[in-house]
Amino acid sequence: MTYDGLDGELVNAQFMTVNVSTTGLTMRQPIAHSWLDYMPGGTAYMPAPAQDTLTGWMSGCPLARWTSSTGQVFIGHIGTIDTNPIANARVKSQFLATMEANTTAFNPFAAWPTAEIAVVQSKFKKSSVNPYIMGLITASGEFYAILIFGIMPRSGAMNEWCIGGCKQVAPMDSAQLRVLLS
């Protein structure tokens, strides 16, 4: 992933309230990250890398972080499928059966209400922008929900992306996650 700068043709001038230069990003700067795949009906997980981890597209799946009995930190994407009640119940019960007591989690999708997404989406000059939500777990264990828009050019293939916002999300503890997954 590379920070490519802002396109003045894409968003209204008043859209951004923080000057990018204050974030430390520079044009064409590579952004180090690991990618955690999504596994519908299962939990995709990996040892926590030394860098931030992205996953998505989010539609309600919880993202979790835990330390195993051996001291290894893991991150996981609990691949719920709300339109498939049998698979949804199975993935939840399988995760619950092996969940560590120190597990923390969050739901990136819940951090972005539909009305708020619509307000951000209205700031684009182009009308064909499609919202998506990604989850980010930082190397230090913080949770973020990222609103991203795919821009549909005249060619019909999405090849431009714009971050609409990023929210830090307070983690739920294992007891709260147990209730969510029950």
Image (cartoon, helix red, strand yellow):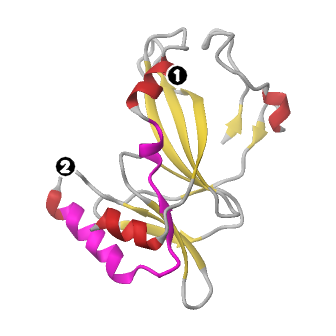
Query: Residue at the spot x=34%, y=76% of the render?
Result: 96
- Can you tell which quarter of the image residue 115 is in? top left
For disc 1, the marked residue is 120
Which numbered tag is attached to residue 5?
Answer: none
> Residue 60: image x %, image y %?
36, 49
Task: Classify residue 90 as left or right of residue 50.
Answer: left
Where is residue 107? Give x, y as percent: 44, 52
Q: Residue at x 41, y 79 (%)?
A: 99
137 shown above or below 2:
below
Magenta span covers which residues? 87-112
Residue 158 falls left or right of residue 16? left
Q: Residues within 10 Å of mark 2 (few under 14, many from 20)?
A: few
**What's the residue at 62%, 86% (across, down)?**
71
Circle 2 sits in a helix, a strand or a loop, which is it?
A: loop
For disc 2, the marked residue is 83
Q: Say if 170 sits above or below 129 in the image.
A: below
Quick one: SS at disc 1?
A: helix
Q: Are marks 2 and 1 in contact (CB under 8 Å)?
A: no
